[in-house]
Amino acid sequence: PPAVPTRGLRRAVRPLAVAAAALVLVAGTAGITARLTRSEPAPVASPDQTAVLDPLEGTGGGDVLMAAHGSTVTMTIETHDLPSTRSGQFYYAWLLDPGTNKMLPLGQVGPSGVASFEVPDSLLLRYAAVDVSLEDDDGDPGHSVTSVLRGSYAAEPRTATS
């Protein structure tokens, strides 16, 4: 059988290989660019649990939205129509066990009326309500005598894969 010239075959294959590699590179770059520049908004997770905050006296209200992430819950408190605080006062959120009146401080509710907290499931399950109080900036870390909003939630055990 006659010998096949390999030198000519190599010259023909090399440009095809370079063209194929360039095509793969261009297609991959276009795909990544399309993903990064997409204008669709990211999907928003809906809360796993909610609770309504009712006024104990006077006006105001709010909602508690809870979204589970493994063994923690992002608890977002949104208040509305609360009276403006005077100088040296602020609103503060607490977890509450209505059976024992035991409270656990969560943190300050800012002037916007919104606050978010990361709460471990183990703590959330020990309480059944959220309380919002009006506090004086007096250095006392305890709950004041003035609760303004309160709402119960039904804490349910979750698995770590939720």
Image: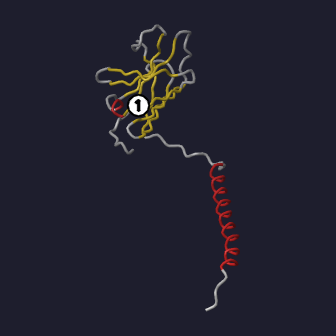
Q: In this view, does 138 lie above or below 148?
A: above
Secondary structure beneath label 1:
strand
Q: Where is residue 3 in the image (x, y as percent from the top left)?
A: 64, 87
Looking at the image, the residue that sits furthest to the top is: 138
Task: Say left or right for 18 vs 134.
Answer: right
Give the position of the C terminus as an image quadrant: top left
- Which residue is found at the position 56% from the left and 16% from the top? 84
Occupied quadrant, residue 75: top left
- The front one of 152 and 90 is 90
- Which residue is found at the position 41% from the left and 26% from the top? 130
Occupied quadrant, residue 99: top left
- Which residue is found at the position 48% from the left and 10% from the top? 136
Within 10 Å of disc 1 (Cα), the crowding (few <14, some 14-19, many 20+) is some
Task: Say left or right for 150 vs 32.
Answer: left
- Identity, as a three-letter code, of the amino acid under mark 1: Val
Q: Position of residue 77 (x, y in %)?
A: 48, 29
Give the position of the N terminus as an image quadrant: bottom right
Looking at the image, the residue that sits furthest to the bottom is: 1
Q: Is residue 31 above or below residue 81?
A: below
Looking at the image, the residue that sits furthest to the left is: 100
Tell me the colour scheme of the image: secondary structure
Q: Position of residue 17 (x, y in %)?
A: 66, 69
Q: How many circles with numbers are drawn on the protein?
A: 1
- The front one of 30 and 17 is 17
Residue hosting label 1: 119
